[in-house]
Amino acid sequence: DQQVKQNSPSLSVQEGRISILNCDYTNSMFDYFLWYKKYPAEGPTFLISISSIKDKNEDGRFTVFLNKSAKHLSLHIVPSQPGDSAVYFCAAVNFGNEKLTFGTGTRLTIIP
Amino acid sequence: ETGVTQSPTHLIKTRGQQVTLRCSSQSGHNTVSWYQQALGQGPQFIFQYYREEENGRGNFPPRFSGLQFPNYSSELNVNALELDDSALYLCASSPRVANYGYTFGSGTRLTVV
């Protein structure tokens, strides 16, 4: 039962353009969401998070949007840079619970 | 400040054997979580330790067990290894429970043959 889904296994974007990564969830108990970035041979790195009381959170070039009615969140990266090439994981949790549920990841490739 | 360190980086074991994986938390972090990442999948929660006590467990059988030590380092033990246990095992630390901006280690790649 995949409660967090990232339906695009890969995405290629031109350098300088916007990258949009998508994530859907099915568990309505989830109320806190995160994005992690993973380079090869490294552990995931926390990128940005959002609580269900908000619909948008920004941090520099990264913005996460949450649509609770659609159970959908997205990560926007503007402008995209070569160093953004990595696998991006969406994760969700019922805040206060110890278990993060991850999606299967989207491999983002930024084309110079 | 040091990050999360995991050892060993790679390991090959035979089915039926036992394995111990180790993790040193980031300085100041008292909460450690372990995740299993199979090929092509996202990390799956195994369990979490807080102040040396198990603080939650995922859908893994009892042959997966853990420990946390007074210095907040941690071990993951797996008994009676099965082929499906082949995966990347990730340790993540955080300064407290319900702080989800985890610091992950680079993982231990376990291969069971």
Image (cartoon, rainbow, N blue to C red):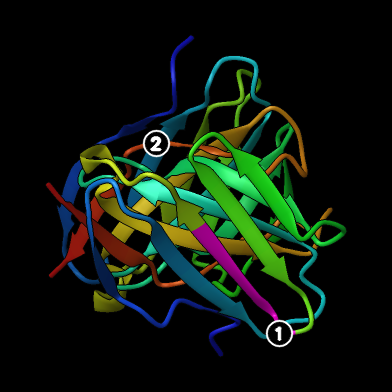
Relative image position of residue A16 (x, y in whole percent) = 28, 46
View extreme (right): residue = A53
Magenta residues (range) = A70-75
Crowding near pointer 1: few (<14 within 10 Å), some, many (20+)? few
Label of residue A82 in the image:
none
Callout 2: 10 Å neighbours few (<14), some, many (20+)?
Answer: many
Residue ranking furthest to the front? A17
Judge by depth and name the residue closer to the eye, A84 or B80: A84
Label 2 sits on a secondary structure element that is loop
Q: Is residue B9 left or right of residue B35?
A: left
Residue indicated by mark 2: B105
How many numbered discs sit on the rendered protein?
2
Disc 2 residue type? Gly
Decide: is B13 above or below B66.
below
* Residue type, label 1: Ala
Up-down relation of residue B6 to residue B20 (above or below):
above
Instruction: List the residue tagged with mark 1.
Output: A70
Q: Residue at x 72, y 39 (%)?
A: B99
